[in-house]
Structure formats: C-alpha cells, structure tokens
Image (tube, rainbow, N blue to C red):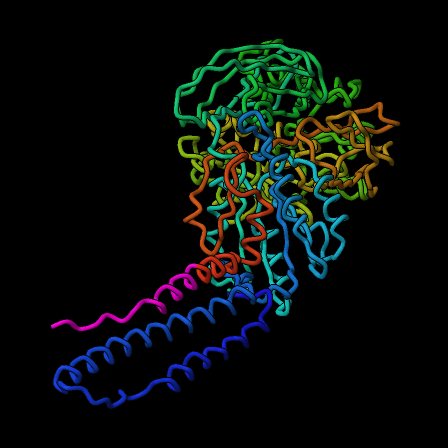
Amino acid sequence: MSFASPWFLFGLLGIAVPIYLHLYYRKTPVRKDFPSLRLIKLSVEFVARRKKMRNLLLMILRIITIILVVMALSRPFIGQSASARSSSDTPTAFVVLLDNSMSMGCTHQGISVFNTAKSRALDILEQMQPGDRATVGLINDPGRLIFSQLTWDKETLQKSVGNIPLSMSGTNMASSILPALKLLVPLQAYRRAVYVITDMTESSWKPFIEKYDLAKVEPGIDLIMVPVGGAAPENMAIINLEAEAPVIMTGRQVPLKVTLANHSQRSRRTRITISINDERKLEEDIEVEANTVKDTRIMATFAKTGMNHVSAAIQSDAMPFDDQRHLAVRVFEPCRILLIKPDSTAGQPENREDIFVKFALNPLNRSKDNNFAVESRSTEEARASDLKKYAAVCLINQRHLDLELIKRLSDYLMGGGNLITFMGNRVEPEWYNKNLIDDLGGSYLLPARIYKRVGNAVSRSVDYQMTDLDAGHPAFSIFARDGSGDPGRAQIFEFFQVRPNPTAMLLARMSHGLPGIVEEKRGRGRSMLITFSADTSWTNWPVRPTWLPFLHQTLISMITANELAIGTIRPGMPVSATITSEEARELALKMPDDNQVKLTVQTGAQGLVHFSTRDTDQNGYYEILAEGGKQILSAFAVNPPAEESLLDRINLRQIPRFIPLAHEAGRGKSVKEKVSLLRDGYDLSGAAMLALMLLALFESWFANLPTARRVD
C-alpha cells in the first residue's frame, strides 16, 4: 500500500483522544437514599452494565472514525504490482517492449493487430510523469532496445513507436526481455516495470519460459503483459518450397516440393500458383486436413539458364505474409563432359576404357533429357577441342600428353574447370609428377604425387576395399543414408600409391590405409585423382550399383562448387558469401522492392569476391549484380520462419510473474486507466470518506439512543 499524502498518517495519534475521554468519564454509581434499596441496587447494576458496553462500542466507533479521517486525507493506494506498494512520489523507470514479428501482421475483427499494439504502446507512454524514465524495445528476431539507455524525452519515445515497422522475422523474447531487465535492475530508487505488448503466440513463448526461470526475476520489477489480437485466427501457410534435383537443366522437368500447413480446426482447400521469373506457369488445387502439414509436388520446366526466381502462392487469408514463398535456383545447360581416352594402337581395336564412365553418365546414350552430354575424344582430337565448353574433363589412363594440351588443361582448371584423373597400366609416375606438377609451378594439375603400384590385377589374389569414406563430401554423402549402397564393398585389385598435397582432401582410403581418392581445389576449379582404373581392369567398382551415383554426385558437386550456397535465409539475418567473378570489383544488391544498395566487398586472388550485407528485412528474391547492375552474378531468397505461421495463443497462467493488462474496445477501463492503476494502485480515499459518513451517522444515532431500563 502507498499513500499520496503520507504525512496525514500522524493523525492516527488522535486515537488517543477517545480512549482518554472514555477512561476519564468512567465513574462509579452515585449513592442515593430510596425506600427500597434492593430494587435500586438491581437497577444501578443493570444500567451500569449497559452503559459500559455502549461506551466501549462508542469508543471503538470513534477510533475507527479517526482512522478513516486520516486514511481519507492521506489518500491510500493498494494494488497487486510492486510499484503500487511504493510511494506515489517515487518516479518510475520502465521499458515498453513491442512485438513487431511477422505474426503481428494478421488482422483481428478487421483491424491490424500490429497497429493495435502500437496504439497500446503510445497509451502506456502517455502515462509518463515528470521524472519518469523509459525506453522502447522490439521483440522480433533479433530483438533490441531502440534506445540503449532510459530517457526522459516522452515525445521522442512516442515518435519512435510510430516509426516502428512490421518485421517479417520471427519472435525472440529473450533478446529483448533480458536486456530490459538488465537495464532496470540497478535502478533501486525507481518504481520499475517492463510492459510486453504481444499477440501471445505459443510458439514464441514456450521456448522462452522453458529456458528461463521468470520466477527468479527481482520482485521489485513488475512484468506486465499487454495481450493483443484476441483468439488465434484460422491460417493456412506455405512453410517450404524447394526443387528436388541436385542440378537443374534447361528443358528438363524438375519436381518442386511445396509444403502447406493448415493451422485451423477444419479441412481447407486452396489453389497453389507457381510462378517462374514472375510469370504464372502452373496451378494446382489441394486440400489439407485440419491441423496438418502436407507436401505436394508440382513438375516445372525451366527455359532460361542462369538464376531463376521461383515463387509459390496461395489465396490470402488473415495472415497474408506467409501465403507466398520464394526460391532462387541456378539453371544450367545440359553439362558437357569431355572424356580423354588413351589413343588406340595402330592395327588394334578402338580403345574402350572410357565405356564405363560414359555409360554411367549417360546410360541410354540419349542426346536429350539427360543431365550430362558426354563426348569421348582421343588425345589427338582433344587438342582441337575448346575446353571452356565443358563442365568437366576426365583423363583416363593416359601415358603422355602433349605439352600444349597440358598448358590448356592448366588454364582450364585454374579458370574454373574441373578435372578427374583415372590411373591405369599406362601411367608413368615420373612423367606425371614432372609434367603435371613440377613443371607447372603454381598451376599444377594433380592433387597428389604418384609413386609405385600396389597389388596385382592379373592374379587378383588379393583385393582391397575403400574405407574411411568422407560422408561430408557430396560424392559420398548420398551413401550415408540406409539403402543407398556401400562403395566399400567394391573390390580393387591394383592401385597407385600416392601422397596428397598439403591442401588436398582425402575422400577415401584403401583398406590398409593408403590414399584411394584425393581432391584439391585448384584456382577456381577442382581436381580429383582416383588411384585405380576407370574400367574393370583393376577393379569391379564400375559394374557395381554405387558407381553411377558416385560419378553423378562427384560431377554435380564440381559443377555447383562455385555457386553461391547461402542456404535458408530468414528476414534480418546477415548474409556473407564468396562468389567468383574476374571483372566484378563493385557489387550491388537488388532487393524485392527493386531498390539497390551497394555491397561491401573484399577482392581476393583467383577472381574471388567476398561480400556481406544486413539488408535482408524483406521477404522475396534478392539478386547480386555487377557491371553497373546489368550482370546477375547470383541470387538468394529470404522467407519467414515457419513457426511464425502457428498463431495458437498461450494461456497467460503458464507464464509466471506476469500481470495481465487486457483491454477490449468499448468495455471497462481504458489502457491509460489500467496502467495508472497498476502503477499507483486503487485509491481508497473515496471508499474511506464514504465509510466515514456512514459511520458518523451510525455513531450519532447510537450515542443518542436512550439506555433501556430494567423492568421486573
């Protein structure tokens, strides 16, 4: 309890007055002579007892009257908050935390929940008194305090609330509530409070209360909840969009997986619209059961190479911001692969050591609808080939190569091409080490030096298996799943002993520990060395089921290695990545609203450009531009977190320490009045005055009531 005028409490000393008067006027009966002493004695005793009881009651009533007079003049306040138990002259320090996460973008009874929340924040700030200090914070992810310190400037705080935008990000209670409490703890001389204005979504509060014990918050700090938005509206959302293909080629159908979530109590039907580069391409109706998540796959075909913008949309509802999702995909022309096989000996059949690689990459030898267009050439034919047209080059069991071809292979690899080298019985280690490593200096081709042969492919008395497969590398990650096969079951009868370069990665070992497959990044390209043959002369792997996926995954990982892979981006997350561009020295970021911002870049060797940005607040498709905004180097998409679409409300009773401050328009007290009651408590002076008047009337009547006489 607190008092507006505590000095009047000294008036309680007046209680001594009726007590003194009661004791002073208390007398013994006066002796009188009457004819019948017996009757008089009985009458006096009876009257004395009645007067004694009435006088005692009158004294109590007069004491209560004095107490009520003092209480009315001192204006007592009582309330459930810690602030109400402090003196009304004590200034207040408080923080208003406004939830501006995406879930606040829904509507309630046709009114924006976020606008209602901003109105509540302004009502709370309106109650600032001279001497009060406050600040405003945001509860999106990551949350923050707009002003890191408390301020007396009410007008500035109100303007800051008016300028707060709705964020497309998720909710992070800890990032705003914890800094607010840290700010208020030292201010012991103030009445302290934290106001949290939010839609009370369960998905945002449960992780917070499970991790942090609010019951341990200092009792002197009031935690006040201001719920907005009412009951959770029905909501259907697109929570995921992805292309189910490791590499996307023009003219080929690709399954797009769209995941829908129906957060309502009834089954709902909606229409999914797929757009590619802002052109509507496909539509499909789908029904989703109540409170379920459903995947649907829609086949799409891309006609444009380079970066493509894919979006999926459904009909708008009470929460419009999760009804569309975006995806950035790189589309390639069918990848051309060059196989350089050994030259055929005069008078002998054509060399076919490339057949297993060729068959694995294009099993049906199709010219269309295949990821890889494979061309097999002899070293003589390869000299006249334009290597830049090929996504990868495979050297198969070569003895010697023309020096001009070696130089072109080196330029091709360092410029972003990919090289796979298979060993075999024609390989001469000394020549390989000298011509493909030593003589090329920093532009060498091989990721390892080659030494002697191990095993005997003729007798096949001893076989080796691949072990220690690097499951984190795309070439072998597919085999980490159950039922995908095990390359370690393949038998290898002969291979070359090699020593990997210091910067090379060892992807597989032989069963006795020697390296089996080695890869190294060379310039902007990648070089892989497989220490055994590409056909069945040294191993039976080419006839096993794991051979095809290994080659496909290896080439896909090489082709997409230089692509920007930012991953899942949520609104507000910083983006930092490295791309390859020889010419670009200045980059720009084109945002979904078509505005462009200059990126901070750092240029490195071999055409690598590193950039970073924090301008990811909008949902949609972002492009990284060069050459004055004309060339699209790469792109990425920003989408809201799926949990923001779940609008179920949490029961306030599950959140400890918070005092509710609910308000319905047109009903009960306004927010301003409720804030004042929480701050100062209920004013009991009016009730004391009313009780005082009633007590005065009763005391006057009771004091003038004649004493009843005994009648025998």
Asked where in the image residue 114 lies, by quadrant, the reply is top right
Q: Is residue 470 left or right of residue 426?
A: left
Q: Specify whether residue 695 is painted magenta.
A: yes
Q: Is residue 233 left or right of residue 632?
A: left
Q: Is residue 290 left or right of residue 679?
A: left
Near-viewer residue (101 or 584)? 101
Q: Is residue 16 above or below residue 303?
A: below
Near-viewer residue (556 or 572)? 572
* Magenta part of the chain: 694-712
Horizontal and vertical percent for residue 597? 82, 34
Horizontal and vertical percent for residue 275? 63, 15
Asked where in the image residue 73 lies, by quadrant, the reply is bottom right
Q: Could one spot residue 597 in this view of the protein?
A: yes
Horizontal and vertical percent for residue 665? 54, 35
Q: Residue at x 60, y 27 (%)?
A: 321
Q: Residue at x 69, y 56 (%)?
A: 129
Q: Specify whether residue 114 is painted magenta.
A: no
Q: Is residue 474 above or below residue 340?
A: below
Q: Residue at x 49, y 11 (%)?
A: 285
Q: Could one spot residue 499 in this view of the protein?
A: no
Instruction: Tell me how many marks there are.
Output: 0
Near-viewer residue (216 or 158)? 158
Near-viewer residue (704 or 477)? 704
Q: Residue at x 57, y 27 (%)?
A: 322
Q: Residue furthest front?
A: 35
- Quadrant position of the C terminus in the picture: bottom left
Q: Is residue 122 above or below residue 288?
A: below
Horizontal and vertical percent for residue 662? 51, 43
Asked where in the image residue 52 lies, by quadrant, the reply is bottom left
